[in-house]
Image: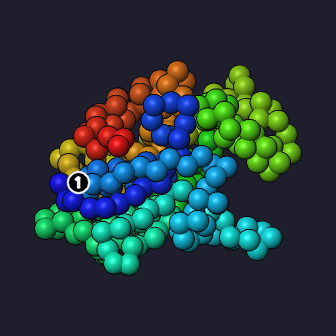
Amino acid sequence: MTTTNIVFLDIPTALPVPFSPNTWKVRLALNYKKLTYVTKWVETTNISSVCKSLGIPPTSTLPDGTPKYTLPALIDNSTSPPALLSDSTPIIEYLERTYPDSDSSRALCAPASRALHALFEYHVAHSITAQLLPVMVMHMHDKKTPQDRIHFRKRTEAAFGKKLEDLELRGKDREAHWKKIEDVFDLLATFMQAGGTAGELFTGSNLSLADCILAGLLLTFRYTSPDEAWIKISTWNDGKWIRYMSALEEWMAVV
């Protein structure tokens, strides 16, 4: 365990655990690297004000030109001056630079692999994450805190011009949509098998940035939709994703 003075900003939920795939991505990395940290819980409605007050940079710009603040964010008080970071991948890259492992085989994202990891992240974002709303919107809504449910409903309904309930697919359309997502996981399983590494993870038994990306998403499925999404995923690829998550269990602590 490396003693560090890190504050990690995450989003609380109505569950005992968070479920944002992007914040889980960083939490897995922190746990894997055995860095000491504390979690500061910030509801979605308070992200902008809290980040501004702490000096955390925005992650992008809204259409009207105002800064957009998102989580995860991280404050590393172990350095002087403290490092203030936002956005999951830059945070993980910072942790790799600042707290490198003496064993190079344990690197989450070696510099030479960053282009490949960026390609993988793009693929997952467009082929899986972007497809979730029609089958996951109410699962995600119902697991948010009461205050964040109001914010999520207002923001999503404004973006799509319809009620959350009307965004959900039903019946045969819903099953067909799940089949599209299953096909993506079939492809991922095929690629991972082609890697020929021992162990369930992308690079064998050590965590990589690709694992942080995919596992964050799988944790979202598991925690927000245990009675639908996770039941389906558990049966895909001969139980591959159950074994995959079991291999990650030691890095899933929430502190």
Residue 48 occupies quadrant = bottom right
Query: How is the model colour-coded?
Result: rainbow
Where 224 sits versus 45, above or below? above
Residue that extends furthest to the bottom in the rendered view of this protein: 81
Q: Nearer the viewer, residue 92 or 37?
A: 37
Residue 255 occupies quadrant = top left
The answer to whether any part of residue 173 appears in the image is no
Q: What percent of the width, then of the height, locates residue 89?
A: 44, 64
Residue that extends furthest to the left in the rendered view of this protein: 103
Q: What percent of the width, then of the height, locates residue 76?
A: 37, 66
Which of the image's four quarters has the N terminus? bottom left
Q: Nearer the viewer, residue 30 or 93?
A: 30
* Residue bearing the label numbered 1: 34
Judge from the rendering whether residue 78 lies leftward or rightward of residue 65; answer left or right: left
Residue drawn at point x = 19 percent, y = 59 percent: 2
Residue that extends furthest to the front in the rendered view of this protein: 53
Residue drawn at point x = 45 percent, y = 35 percent: 17
Judge from the rendering whether residue 171 lies leftward or rightward of residue 106; answer left or right: right
Q: Nearer the viewer, residue 122 or 147?
A: 147
Residue drawn at point x = 46 percent, y = 50 percent: 40
Label tally: 1
Question: Label 1 is placed on what type of residue?
Answer: Lys
What element does badge 1 sit on? loop
Q: What percent of the width, then of the height, locates residue 164?
A: 77, 35
Q: Nearer the viewer, residue 140 or 238?
A: 140
- Residue count near mark 1 (Cα–Cα under 10 Å), binned few <14, some 14–19, many ≥20: some
Judge from the rendering whether residue 187 lies leftward or rightward of residue 66; answer left or right: left
The answer to whether any part of residue 13 appears in the image is yes
Q: What percent of the width, then of the height, locates residue 244?
A: 31, 39
Residue drawn at point x = 76 percent, y = 74 percent: 65
